[in-house]
Image (tube, rainbow, N blue to C red):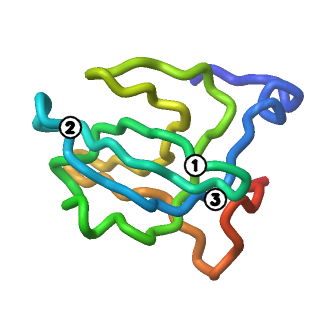
């Protein structure tokens, strides 16, 4: 397993975002396009979760997202944040706060 210095880890900005829009990417069976409110703005996200979550189940869900990655174009969408999820074989589970914290809260 690779390790990184604590200073490198502190560069990652992880926040709690709220899914305000979710739709399957038309030309992909695995990708979901979402708009995620991170407190000060709404960001686009493209994630490979369409086989694990129906779009309507994501609306209003608060999830952990990395907000400071370089944006990436996928299937015509610019993905500006990355969701955090646990993967166990065929199970994908997005990371959610266990208490009702404000949108934009920093994950430390």
Location of residue 55 (image quadrant): bottom left
Q: In the image, what residue occupies the spot 47% across and 19% down?
A: 72
Q: Residues within 10 Å of mark 2 (few under 14, many from 20)?
A: many
Q: Residues within 10 Å of mark 1 (few under 14, many from 20)?
A: some
Lower sequence index among marks 3 and 1: 3
Q: In the image, what residue occupies the spot 25% across and 54% down?
A: 91
Q: CA distance from mark 2 to mark 3?
A: 23 Å
Q: Nearer the viewer, residue 107 or 4?
A: 107
Callout in the foreground (2, 1): 1
Residue 13 point in image, percent of width and height: 74, 40
Q: In the image, what residue occupies the spot 73% across and 53% down?
A: 40
Callout in the foreground (3, 1): 1
Assess whether mark 1 and mark 2 are in contact (beta carbons under 8 angstroms).
no
> Which residue position is annotated with label 1?
42
Q: Nearer the viewer, residue 103 or 4?
A: 103
**Numbered disc 2: secondary structure:** loop
Residue 92 point in image, percent of width and height: 30, 52
> Which residue position is annotated with label 3?
16
> Which residue position is annotated with label 2?
25
Q: In the image, what residue occupies the spot 79% across and 53% down?
A: 108
Q: CA distance from mark 2 to mark 1?
A: 18 Å
Lower sequence index among marks 2 and 1: 2
Residue 63 point in image, percent of width and height: 52, 60
Which numbered tag is attached to residue 55? none
Q: Is residue 52 left or right of residue 7?
A: left
Above-or-below relation of 13 to 75: below
């Amino acid at each position: 397993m690779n390790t990184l210095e604590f200073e490198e880890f502190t560069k990652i900005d992880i926040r709690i975002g709220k899914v305000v829009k979710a739709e399957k990417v038309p030309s992909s069976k695995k990708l979901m396009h979402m708009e995620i409110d991170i407190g000060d703005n709404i960001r686009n996200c493209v994630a490979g979760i369409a086989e694990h979550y129906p779009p309507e189940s994501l609306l209003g869900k608060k999830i952990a997202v990395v907000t400071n990655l370089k944006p990436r174009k996928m299937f015509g969408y610019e993905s500006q944040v990355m969701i955090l999820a646990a993967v166990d074989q065929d199970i994908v589970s997005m990371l959610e706060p266990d208490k009702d914290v404000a949108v934009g809260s920093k994950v430390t």
